[in-house]
Image: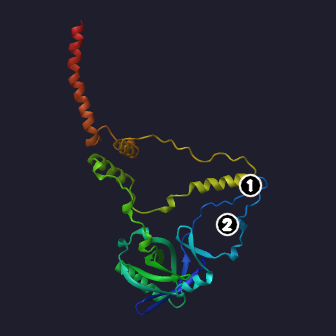
């Protein structure tokens, strides 16, 4: 069944106008629950209570307030907020083209598919192919539901995608987060980490390999409940080992990946050094033990 369009617009590309239709690209499939009263199984309804007047207030009678100082608000009606909205426009006016690699994914908010609307097939195809050839994506501003949005349009899967984006002042500064001390990393640890990344590397992104196992267990439990069976614990009990030393953790991770195919002569230089030291100490200790045994006789 083909997806339903959630809206339409027009991409402005120089003097070219491209009518497009917008489709939702992804949606969350998380399991949701309702709040019930365990005594009777009835669904709980929320009431809006004013603690100052100690009375229930109807949602239709509410106004919105902006807190400009502690416990101090200015009030707005829906009509006042509506008057502040930008003029609704279907025009997606491209401002500039930039390399996709220059756009940090942290700015992406939500994704939509764009398809050509009636009469826009050729222009849509032209823009898509031209962006692929130039290896560029488009940045534009688009007024959606009265609010201006920064959007990015990129060619993908032989078509165009539109990403709504956060504005720069909405993204927090990463400098506020402690990212650790790089001077504490030893060269050997970095070498092992590099090897581990190589062992776990793939040639392409394959999201179909991953699934929401929690959702699967919850839906299986729901089915058992419906059928009147007793629900048992379906969550796998993972066996975890505590590893304190980073070097040991890296070695153990590599060992799990390559242990089955390793031979006795496949030791790394990092592994050979401790082994050679142990053999040397054992050889030096042998004459001393022999001499001590002779003295006892």
Say which residue appears at 35% left-offset and 80% top-offset.
Answer: 134
Quarter of the view holding residue 94: bottom left
Q: Can you see residue 133?
A: no
Tell me the element at label 2.
loop
- Disc 1 and disc 2: Cα gap in Å? 44 Å
Residue wearing tag 1: 226
Q: Can you see residue 238?
A: yes
59 shown above or below 33: below
Answer with left or right where residue 209 lies relative to residue 229. Answer: left
Say which residue appears at 36% left-offset and 56% top-offset.
Answer: 179
225 shown above or below 93: above
Give the numbered dot on residue 52.
Answer: 2
110 shown above or below 202: below
Q: Give the image location of residue 120, x and y in percent.
A: 50, 89
Tell me the element at label 1.
helix
Q: Nearer the viewer, residue 133 or 53?
A: 53
């Amino acid at each position: 069944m083909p997806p339903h369009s959630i809206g339409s617009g027009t991409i402005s590309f120089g003097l070219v106008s491209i009518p497009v239709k917008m489709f939702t690209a992804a949606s969350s499939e998380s399991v949701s629950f309702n709040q019930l009263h365990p005594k009777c199984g009835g669904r709980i309804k929320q009431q809006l209570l004013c603690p100052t007047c100690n009375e229930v207030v109807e949602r239709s009678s509410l106004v919105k307030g902006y807190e400009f100082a502690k416990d101090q608000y200015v009030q707005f009606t829906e009509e006042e907020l509506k008057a502040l909205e930008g003029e609704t426009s279907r025009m997606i006016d491209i401002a500039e083209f930039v390399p996709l690699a220059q756009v940090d994914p942290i700015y992406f908010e939500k994704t939509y598919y764009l398809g050509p609307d009636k009469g826009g097939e050729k222009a849509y195809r032209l823009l898509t192919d031209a962006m692929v050839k130039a290896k560029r994506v488009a940045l534009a501003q688009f007024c959606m539901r009265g609010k201006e949005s920064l959007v990015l349009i990129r060619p993908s899967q032989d078509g165009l995608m539109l990403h709504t984006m956060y504005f720069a002042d909405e993204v927090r500064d990463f400098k506020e987060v402690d990212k650790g001390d790089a001077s504490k990393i030893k060269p050997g640890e970095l070498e092992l980490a590099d090897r581990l990344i190589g062992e776990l590397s793939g040639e392409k992104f394959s999201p179909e390999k991953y699934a929401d196992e929690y959702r699967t267990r919850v839906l299986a439990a729901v089915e058992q409940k419906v059928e009147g069976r007793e629900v048992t614990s379906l969550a796998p009990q993972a066996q975890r080992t505590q590893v304190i030393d980073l070097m040991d953790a890296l070695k153990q991770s590599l060992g799990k990946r390559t242990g089955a195919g390793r031979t006795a002569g496949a030791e790394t230089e990092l592994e050979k050094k401790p082994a050679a030291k142990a053999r040397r100490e054992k050889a030096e200790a042998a004459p001393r033990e022999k001499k001590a045994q002779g003295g006892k006789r």
